[in-house]
Amino acid sequence: MTNPPVLDLLAKYDPLIAEHAGLLSTGIRDPFGIVMEKVLSPTEAIIKGRHTILLGTYNYMGMTFDADVIEAGRQALTDFGAGTTGSRVLNGTYQTHAACEEALKDFYGMSHAMVFSTGYQANLGMVSTLAGKGDFIILDADSHASIYDGCKMSNADIVRFRHNDVADLEKRLKRLPPEAGKLVVLEGVYSMLGDVAPLPELVAVAKAHGAMVLVDEAHGMGFFGEHGRGVYEEQGVADDVDFVVGTFSKSVGTVGGFCVSNHPKFEILRLVCRPYTFTASLPPAVIACSTTSIRKLMTAHDKRARLWEATRRLHGGLKARGFRLATDTPESAIVSVLMPDQETTALMWSTLIELGVYVNMSRPPATPAGVFLLRCSICALHSDEQIDIVLAKFEQAAQMAQLALHEHA
Amino acid sequence: MTDRATVYARIIELIEPLNTKKVALTEATSFAGDMEMDSLTVMDLVASMEDEWDIMIPLNLLPDLETIGQVADAVAGLVAKKG
Ligand SMILES: Cc1ncc(COP(=O)(O)O)c(C=O)c1O
């Protein structure tokens, strides 16, 4: 008896393998294979032996090397050990985890906080657990993959509306049965184009149709609003947002995710939310770093001001040099440069890395509407000199990649 | 009255501009396999059909709607249900 031939399950990826190989055969570096050999600071690393300015790390507030944050982690590592080896609902909740949730409640001024192991899991868990069979999830077309995956995991019916389009949201809500449960999922900042949502209008329409609202503030935490809570705070809709999801992997500078809420029944979610229950909790050192970082972010007014200043410098400088940007004004700390096609994007990205500047390359389907982007995320610790070097390198790279720049009006 | 034939004809019109591979459009033509549409394009196409007939096609139904014929059946059904 011989066994039948084994069907190669990876064969379905052959087209992608060919596309990726084609890209690399032109001699450029792999945009998705960067290794940081040494990290010198929140804004500098050694990549392939070269001193590189980091402009694509979402390390908005530069907390990764904060002395207090590191000391808190060191202490927790000594006191509580390397890991918890357990779920939050079994042996994985230490005093450190409880303290972190207290810090989040204080930061957001809310009565409940739940810490997940990543932001991806926070969205996956919240979206899939809140909306069940017979309910509707209404999400923005440009939502993050974790929100789409949460929809897939839920048993709800999924309705998608045009990106940041209030009228389209309203039209789609009108088609839903009035008696059904509804969850509208929004983001404060959309990370591909760096544009901000018109939350007052979107939230008002959601509420007018009896929906609960969840806002992902992954890219808004730390520097939007009086307390740095996010776009929803800055735009004054805190009272109408039912759930805020966030991550520690950006402004907080560690890893982890969370949801905060004032809903009186919130705590039951710990028992029914599978991405919370069926995975190990974050190591105490990570949690202690996060707690310290969150508490410091509450009053980081100078850093916030500096972040906006550096962002305006980069946005204005790129615009003045004729680059096409995704937003006309700097709406967030993400500045996205629009590129014509995959080849130019890859060549431009690769040239920048050779010149010592790291940015993100983004392409469909992660990007909306087939656009190619070079995405820059700014850090409060970027100096004016670093931004100016980046601007010069961008100009140089555009010449080398033969990217047409536009006459500035 | 919007019967299935009318729906089918209109769906073909909506697909045509997105048919970049210029494949022949029949009842059995599949979106991902034959037309090589990515998921974003398919979702945008679904949105245009929702607006055309003022219906709702939840995204979670999409895995079962592989061909033009299957979409026409689903849309005709939803339109009929609307009355
Ligand atoms: C909008 C948004 N939500 C959620 C996440 C997930 O965050 P994490 O890195 O903690 O998994 C990200 C980050 O990629 C994001 O951009």
Image: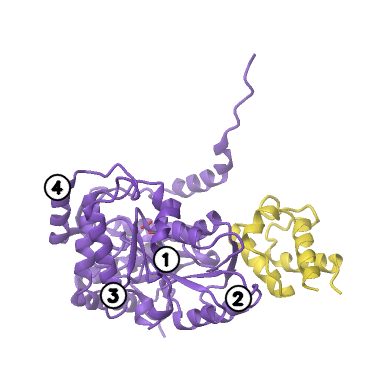
Q: Is residue B34 above or below residue A236?
A: above
Circle 1 sits on which residue? Answer: A265
Circle 3 sits on which residue? Answer: A228
Residue A98 in sight from this viewpoint:
yes
Circle 4 sits on which residue? Answer: A79
- Number of residues whose C-alpha sits closer than 10 Å to that of mark 4, classed few (under 14), some (14–19) or many (20 or more): few
- Number of residues whose C-alpha sits closer than 10 Å to that of mark 2, classed few (under 14), some (14–19) or many (20 or more): many
The lab-note entry on whether marks 2 and 4 share a chain reads yes
Q: CA distance from mark 3 to mark 2?
A: 31 Å
The lab-note entry on whether marks 3 and 2 share a chain reads yes
Please report the residue visible at 24 percent of the width from the left and 66 percent of the height from the top.
A294
Give the amino acid type for the residue marked by disc 4 in the picture.
Asp
Choose mark 4 or mark 1, whichever is in front: 1
Please report whichever mark, 3 or 2, sits nearer to the chain's N-terminal start. Answer: 2
Q: CA distance from mark 2 to mark 1?
A: 25 Å
Residues tagged 2 and 1 counted as in contact (Cβ below 8 A): no
Q: Which chain is yellow?
A: B
Q: CA distance from mark 4 to mark 1?
A: 33 Å
Please report whichever mark, 2 or 1, sits nearer to the chain's N-terminal start. Answer: 2
Q: CA distance from mark 2 to mark 4?
A: 51 Å
Label drawn at residue A173: 2
Q: Position of residue A241 (x, y in %)?
A: 42, 75
Q: CA distance from mark 1 to mark 3?
A: 26 Å
Q: Position of residue B42 (x, y in %)?
A: 64, 61
Label drawn at residue A220: none
